[in-house]
Amino acid sequence: MATSLTTGRPWRVILMFTVPLMIGNVVQQMYQFADTVVVGRLLGVEALASVGATGSLLFLLLGFAWGLTSGFAIPTAQAYGARDYDAVRRSVASGAILSAITTVILTIGAPLLAEPALVLLQTPPELLAEATVFAQISFLGAGALMFFNFLSAIIRAIGDSRTPLVFLVVSCALNVVLVIVAIAWLGLGVAGAALATVVAQATSVILCLTFVRRRIPELHLHRADWRVTRADIVEHLRLGLPMGFQASIIAIGALIVQVRLNSLGADAVAAYTAASRVDGLAVALLQSMSLAVSMYVAQNYGAGRPDRIRRGVVQATWMALTGAVVLGVVMITFGAPLVRVFIGDGADGVVDAAHAMLVINGVSYTALGVLFVTRGALQGLGSTVIPTVTGLIELVMRGAAAIVLGAVMGFVGVAWSNPLAWVGAAVILIPAYLRAHRALASMPSAPMEVTPTTPIPVVGPVEGSMNVEAIVTQPVTLPQVTSRMRRALRPRRRARQRVDRKR
């Protein structure tokens, strides 16, 4: 159900929006959990390492798709916050067109590049064949991932973070069943694990489309909505491409890490893969706050409420720090038993290495929590330069740590690459957001519009029963965005639209 994020206590609004995202991210991690557990237990450590060897390559291209669609949803959220439903539909149409074009490019080009890329990454020869098959099938199903991410993003942009969660739970349950059937019963090996994930994601796309058609009239597109302007496309690319490139830049750093791991052997790859699955769960929980803050900021920015943005980001930072401390304690205390879920008996060295990585990451989650909140806030404001720069910082820090520390300290040195990248990015993001925070303080806030009163019955006891005693009315305040406010808060977009109209 569409929900405005422009009213209510900021911390409560953000928390209520974040909780379904957290659950959804946990469920989404179950895709990888199911693949890893079944592959590791039924097919062995070598097959597990084959799947793990594709992780960075998949993140490079599919992470780009995720970042791209998340950026496409920011104009949707800003238009919804301003209650400009024509702009909402044009934004959805623009994002759908650009998502379709990206899907075609990925589906045709990525499978052809999978094997050469894995060879370039120095994938161990004994892992190459299965890793190639897993990557090619995953890339052939890129359209399912692309459009599920896009549809989920626009549903969240209008304030509904629960519905994508429901569809994700259904899809994950289907994925678990299909992975077991494909590997244990049909004997399809790692190809079956990849195919099961693609089919499950395609099912979630169908569910999202059905829900939008039946339940969200604000997103029903008409023929006129598809006549998007050049300004619409440019605005979506301005926000989507940097977020996509940011994910890809981070993935390039992960590729460097992968090369270093491959040089350390299959056991190092397996340890990193198992640790990444557990660590990915904690990171996903913190990342939920980033997406929630981004949508919250975008809606309030469109509604002309810089005061709510300032309060909300501060409160979200404290929530993220608290969550980071709790997750760090869990990783440090229970990391080894969690890793053993993926690794069978007789691989104690792999388990010890994976646990060491979880301890290193666990003590660094506070930096990651601040990183996610500040980056989400800047993206919600429409900022693209600083988040992209921080992606470059992460690339440099992660790559340098993997190369230098990996040569000196081996696997432990490689494990330090992620925390150092988080700290490097946070050092840039914190001052950047503080400048934006001060700029928001100088912006005017939109006046509040009082809606028509709504009758509410007040009941009281009458001879042991409940009876209506009176009818009172309660006005509900909503932000009223004037044309002056829109001009003050969104000058660059207005300027581009004027130029496009002149052309």
Image (spheres, grey):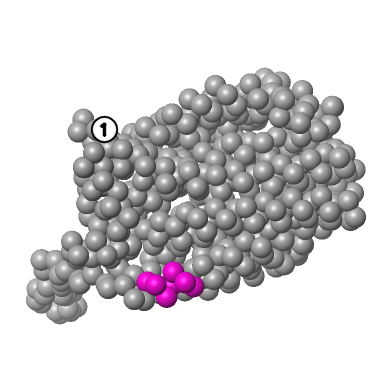
| Most foreground residue, 249 or 186 | 249
**How many marks can you see?**
1
Q: Which residue is mark 1?
A: 226
> Residue 11, percent across and down?
42, 71
Quadrant assignment, res 286: bottom right
Give the x, y percent position of residue 366: 63, 68
The answer to whether 236 appears left or right of 143 in the picture is: left
Q: Nearer the viewer, residue 26 or 52?
A: 52
Q: In terms of secondary structure, what is the magenta stretch mainly?
A: helix
Q: For the magenta stretch, what is the residue range?
A: 434-440
Visible residue check, residue 315: no
Q: Is residue 147 visible?
A: yes
Magenta-span inclusion, residue 110: no
Report the residue at 62% width, 46% height from top: 249
Q: Residue at x 62, y 23 (%)?
A: 111
Q: Is residue 63 above or below residue 375?
A: above
Q: Amino acid at mark 1?
A: Trp
Residue that appears at 79% across and 40% down? 259
Tell which of 458 and 180 is nearer to you. 180
Q: Position of residue 361 (x, y in %)?
A: 72, 60
Quarter assignment of residue 485: bottom left
Q: Is residue 77 above or below residue 12?
A: above
Query: Left or right: where does residue 228 sit relative to residue 149?
Result: left
Q: Work out which quarter of the rendered image holds the C terminus and state it.
A: top left
Q: Residue at x 51, y 26 (%)?
A: 105
Q: Is residue 344 left or right of residue 111?
A: right
Q: Quadrant of residue 17?
A: bottom left
List x then y, in percent, for residue 76.
Answer: 33, 48
Compared across the picture, whether 354 is left or right of 102 comes to right
